[in-house]
Amino acid sequence: MFLLVAAISAANICIAYLFLPGRLKQIETVIIEPLHSTKAISDKLKRHKIIKHPRLFLFLSKIYSSRHPLKSGEYMFTPGISPLQVLKVLASGKSVIHRLVIPEGVMVSEIVDKVNREPRLLGEIKGVVPEGYLMPSIYFYSYGDLKERIIEQMRKKMTLALDEVMTKLTPDSPLKNRLEVLILASIVEKETGLESERTTIAGVFINRLKKGMKLQADPTSIYAVTEGKYKLTRPLTKKDLAIISPYNTYYAQSLPPGPIACPGVKSLQAVVNPAKTNALYFVVNGKGGHNFASTLKEHNENVLKYRQSKIPENSTENP
């Protein structure tokens, strides 16, 4: 009889413990690594003040996990969470979801570096990713997801975007294939951050290609300097513009052999559906945009206006 009473009493204590509010005072996020034992999990939860009485929790977690295995992952625990709720969270496998933001116009090397620096992503990125073939966007992941899986999502998203825009490429376009569309879109992406200007800048480059003119796009010269391995942190020089490289469009006659960055959807759309314009030139206006011109004379006047706007009022420099 005594043993029965003791067993019932112990069972009641365990049940009561499972439902009692825990000691946690604020939201806490904990990573449960793969192959963690129930003891290791109990010890970690105690250190983070999520549970009291770790030995009792360990005993109960062994019973609970026999039918509901506890899974690795990154979990968020709310203030006052009970031991039973903790076990349910660990058995759910529903890890915290994180966002990975890839801005438009970054190079593949920058994307790979950013993915590799995410501590919650595992594995390695396989092979060499060609420049331009990753789609800038927002990607979601949780602890334990593979780096290669994220990169593959970016590849697929770019492939689908190219599939879509190629159906809108007109027969009279100087761009004849997916690669050329991607190349010019990457240049447009690097030339402006204003969505309202993309189609006009694309129109300028399309006009220049049709006339057999050099593109003379500064971002391509920057890529010729860096070879896509790093971000140039200094202004271009005259020496840079004279670099003998197929990527330097001040030297090369046509499109570079490959993209110089990863363009977004809007830039891809702009080069297959450019603005109808006579413009052949553009220069920054000092206000975040560009001034466009259809003649070299008009362009030189725009350049002069920009240079004069950059001279301080009290300067004695001649423009």
Image (spheres, grey):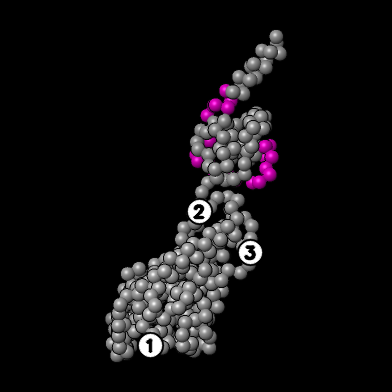
Please name whichever residue, 229 or 265, is drawn nearer the observer in this view of the structure: 265
Residues at circles 2 and 3 in contact by the CB criterion of under 8 Å: no
Q: Classify 10 Å Cα crowding around label 3: few (below 14), some (14-19), many (20 and above).
A: few
Locate residue 146, reporting x and y percent. 60, 55
Residue 195 sits above or below residue 96 on the image: below
Occupied quadrant, residue 20? top right
Q: Secondary structure at mark 3?
A: loop
Q: Classify 10 Å Cα crowding around label 2: few (below 14), some (14-19), many (20 and above).
A: few
Q: Amino acid at mark 3?
A: Lys
**Residue bearing mark 1:** 211
Q: Which residues are magenta?
A: 16-40
Q: Residue at x 38, y 75 (%)?
A: 170
Q: Secondary structure at mark 2?
A: strand
Q: Residue at x 53, y 39 (%)?
A: 77
Q: Amino acid at mark 1?
A: Lys
Q: CA distance from mark 1 to mark 2?
A: 44 Å
Q: CA distance from mark 2 to mark 3?
A: 20 Å
Q: Is residue 280 left or right of residue 252?
A: left
**Residue bearing mark 3:** 126
Residue 84 visible in the displayed image: yes
Residue 15 sits above or below residue 241 on the image: above
Q: Nearer the viewer, mark 3 or mark 1?
A: 1
As drawn, the label of residue 9 is none
Locate residue 119, reporting x and y percent. 59, 55
Please name whichever residue, 208 or 173, is drawn nearer the observer in this view of the structure: 173
Residue sticking out furthest to the front: 171
Mark closest to the chain's N terminus, 3 or 1: 3
**Residue bearing mark 2:** 140
Q: Residue at x 52, y 68 (%)?
A: 133
Locate residue 283, reporting x and y percent. 34, 81
Magenta segment includes 27: yes
